[in-house]
Image: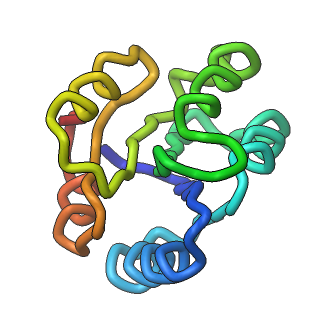
């Protein structure tokens, strides 16, 4: 999958910095935006417009955040942004290793993938180079 833009939503500033560095320096995707709040990301996505028909947005969404959880973000996304779903691929980030939680998250029709924390360069490299979503 060729993503033209990447949006990271996570309350951890160290993780945001690390993933930004991996994506920009090692994977060459210059269009990177991060948010500590899911509300800010929803606002951004509501106003985001693609410049051409090849636009594809990767959203990396932390599942456990204090203000707006990943599940609550998905509910807002469904209410406000379903018209943009074809442009947006949402992958959940979580330190949870429980298979039940992973399966529950992946059963959501809005979620295209699950990445366990800590996120590695190789996991992101695979995500950015696959032809189809896992």
Q: Nearer the viewer, residue 1 or 134?
A: 134
Give the residue displayed 30% in from the left and 44% down from the top: 1
The image shows residue 120, relative to residue 129, as above or below, that is below
Q: Measured from the top left, where is residue 30 in percent x and y?
A: 55, 72
Give the residue displayed 43% in from the left and 50% down from the top: 3
Judge from the rendering whether residue 48 lies leftward or rightward of residue 115; answer left or right: right
Q: Nearer the viewer, residue 64 or 126?
A: 64
Give the residue displayed 29% in from the left and 26% down from the top: 106
Q: How is the image coloured?
A: rainbow
Q: Nearer the viewer, residue 117 or 58?
A: 117
Q: Measured from the top left, where is residue 92 in percent x and y?
A: 39, 43
Q: Quadrant of residue 129?
A: bottom left
Q: Quadrant of residue 42?
A: top right
The image shows residue 97, relative to residue 10, as above or below, that is above
Give the residue displayed 45% in from the left and 21% down from the top: 110
- Looking at the rendered image, the quarter that the C terminus falls into is top left
Q: Measured from the top left, where is residue 4 in percent x and y?
A: 51, 53
The image shows residue 133, relative to residue 37, as above or below, that is above
Judge from the rendering whether residue 130 lies leftward or rightward of residue 81; answer left or right: left
The image shows residue 64, relative to residue 117, as above or below, that is above
């Amino acid at each position: 999958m060729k993503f033209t833009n990447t949006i990271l939503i996570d309350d951890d500033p160290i993780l945001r910095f690390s993933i930004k560095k991996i994506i920009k320096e090692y994977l060459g995707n210059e269009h990177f935006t991060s948010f500590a709040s899911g509300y800010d990301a929803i606002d951004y996505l509501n106003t985001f417009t693609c410049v051409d028909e090849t636009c594809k947005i990767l959203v990396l969404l932390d599942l456990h955040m204090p203000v707006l959880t990943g599940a609550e973000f998905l509910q807002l996304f469904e209410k406000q942004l379903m018209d943009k779903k074809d442009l947006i691929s949402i992958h959940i980030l979580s330190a949870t290793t429980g298979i039940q939680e992973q399966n529950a998250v992946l059963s959501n029709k809005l979620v295209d993938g699950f990445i366990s924390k800590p996120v590695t360069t190789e996991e992101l490299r695979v995500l950015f180079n696959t032809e189809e979503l896992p």
